[in-house]
Amino acid sequence: MSKPPHGPLQGVKVVSCSTAQAGTVPYMLMADLGADVIKIETPDGGDGSRRMTVLPGKGSTFFETNNRGVKSVTLNLKTPEGKAILHKLVAKADIFGQNFRPGAAEKNGFGYEELRKINPKLVYVSISGYGTQGPNGHLPGTDSMAQALGGIAEAYSMPGQKMRTGIASVADESTAMLAFGGALAALTHARATGVGQKIELSLLGSLVRLLGWTFTTTMWRDKNPVTGQARVTGTAERPGISASFNDRDGKPLVFQLTGPEDWKDAMTSLGFIERIEARGFGNLGVIIDNDAKREELLALLDELFATGTRDDWVARLRGADIVSAPINTMLEASNDPDVIANGHVTFVDHPKHGKLKVHGTPWRFSETPAQPGIAPELGEHNEAALTELGYSAADIADLKARKII
């Protein structure tokens, strides 16, 4: 039986002059799905993230996670020869990506107007921090900057405490996923029409999109959402709540309800219904737009959940078809049975570091399964890429000696 083809993006060629997370993950995802991705790095050390979060015996978690499956070609783009090689690679590419601050790509020979003359079908992806149209478009951007400006810090906050950004790179990752989808949408158009285009994304814009309908509600109400232990939604007639509580051992759980009928079912399954009704909370709608009532109810639920165990509470709620789950730490999440069973984490055999536990892929393709790779050594694919462009062994040796590659 023949081996199934690797991923649905076989035949797609990508060149990336990108660093950091938002600029590399889109193309790592494409590599997972079979695309031929060439990452351009500087000859003198390469992507700086190769030296970030290096664990003894396992290398850089940052670089490995964001660059697996791609090929590394080193080019000194400050030289005419280096730019010429990049242009030859772009001439054969479907997608090009860069995430330098606005203006830097043009200065270094890989701006959109320059590359589209070489390849009119090229899909050109440009990622910035703030977006290019506003007053701060010229500034560099980071994940924490976008979290701060975009409003998601409120999601991590508790009433009365300082707002803070979170440790998960939600701006970087949401930008990467939007870049991934946008690039493939533009590629579909380019293949149908022969016309490429430039796609601009920003960390800030992607973070705003990530906030979804809660952001819309905030804008329409012109009022900040309720934050902290509970997220209260809806109206007095159709109230909803998502709230977290600790069990008697301090282990946290969450449940979410989307209507008044769910509230009664949830409280009945937990054995709380009599206490809840006795205190005047038979109708969840009484806490909508009433801070005092909301705090009173949450205090009562804190008391009730502290009488039992998390596993029992979650089992009871799920038995009543109420959405509920333990609140995992990141380490617990990496070992969660559903995470493991669905391949959201997996193992790869690394030639230098042995068996490593890594991200799986978020998709399951029935005919062209994804296949996680490993991150390349610096310049590992120089010879293969340049040979394919027509350079001889002597040419390649000369380029290396002159530190062009």
Image (cartoon, rainbow, N blue to C red):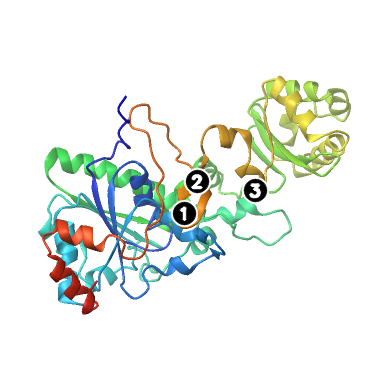
- Secondary structure under tag 2 reads strand
Distance in Å between CA atoms under marks 2 and 1: 8 Å
In the image, residue 8 sits, relative to residue 238, either above or below, namely below
Residue farthest along the bottom direction in this orientation: 402
Callout 3: helix, strand or loop? helix
Say whether disc 3 or disc 1 marks the residue closer to the N-terminus.
1
Looking at numbered disc 2 in the image, what kind of residue is underneath it? His
The residue type indicated by label 1 comes to Thr
Element at label 1: helix
Q: Which residue is mark 1?
A: 65
Mark 2 Cα shell of 10 Å, populated few (<14), some (14-19), many (≥20):
some
Q: Residue 84, which numbered label?
A: none
Residue depicted at x 59% and y 59% = 165
Q: Amino acid at mark 3?
A: Leu
On the image, numbered disc 3 is attached to which residue?
331
The percent coordinates of residue 271 (x first, y second) are 84, 23
Task: Residue at 45% x, 56% y: name it.
Answer: 64
* Quarter occupied by the C terminus: bottom left
| Residue underneath mark 2 | 359
Q: Measure how far apart labels 3 and 1 are at the Cα level.
A: 16 Å
